[in-house]
Image: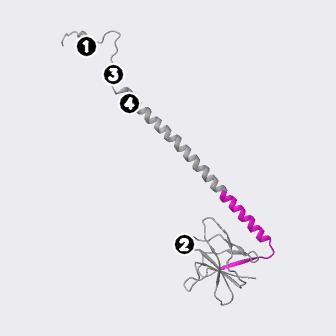
Amino acid sequence: MSNETPNQNDRPALGYVQEPARGTGWGAMLVVACLALGFSASAVEYERVWGQGQQQRAELLETADSEAAGQLEDLGKILADPQTRLIRLTAMDASPITNAMIVWNSSRQKGYFLCDQLRMLDAGMTYEVWTRRGSDEPIRIAGIQPKAGQSVYPFRATGAQSRDRLEISAGAPSAQNAPILTGEFD
């Protein structure tokens, strides 16, 4: 062991505090503070955008609800009209639809297709509503575009004439595309 006495130059002078190495303390704290500020700002922006999205979604649902209420009100008016006929539709062949009906008012040339099990079709295809008398060629009166969760489909007839029978097909009827539902007028 050596008996060396500490050199006076190795000791800090009284009242003198040794500085930490530059850039280690304040720089790290500044980086952490900036990161925290950035995360806070991001969280605030996320909450703002999320809130706006929820408000827009609520407005869309309110509009859809109002539209559905209007359709039901119109359906009620048509059902109250003594000229309105209810046409029960019968499924043909392997149709998965078991219960469907047409509410038809010939004086208004307006109707409603009521069906809970209407499956979606390929893009660009619609369900077609046709009328027929005996073996005459069918006449298209309306097209119906299915929507998920919807079971009431209003339509306005075009070219409707007095006929015996109503047919619904997925697309235009042909030898390969037979009607999936049929019904008889009173």
Residue placed furthest toward the right? 82
Main secondary-structure element of the magenta-colored stretch: helix
Q: What amino acid does circle 1 point to?
A: Asp
Q: Is residue 43 left or right of residue 88?
A: left
Element carrying mark 1 = helix
Q: Residue at x 66, y 55 (%)?
A: 62
Measure how far apart labels 2 and 3 are at the Cα level.
74 Å
Task: Say few, some or many: other residues with alpha carbon within 10 Å of mark 4 (under 14 / 14 to 19 / 20 or more).
Answer: few
Where is mark 1, residue-wise?
A: 10
Q: Nearer the viewer, mark 2 or mark 4?
A: 2
Question: Where does residue 90 sit, x and y in percent of width and height?
Answer: 67, 80
The residue at which mark 2 appears reads as 124
Quadrant in which residue 69 is drawn = bottom right
Helix, strand or loop for disc 4: helix
Q: Which residue is mark 4?
A: 28
Q: Earlier in the sequence, mark 4 or mark 3?
A: 3
Mark 2 residue type: Gly
User: In the displayed structure, does residue 29 sit left or right of residue 150?
Assistant: left
Q: Which residues are magenta?
A: 63-90
Along the line of sight, which residue is nearer the eye, 105 or 167?
105
Q: Which residue is mark 3?
A: 20
Q: Label 3 is placed on what type of residue? A: Pro
Image-quadrant location for residue 172: bottom right
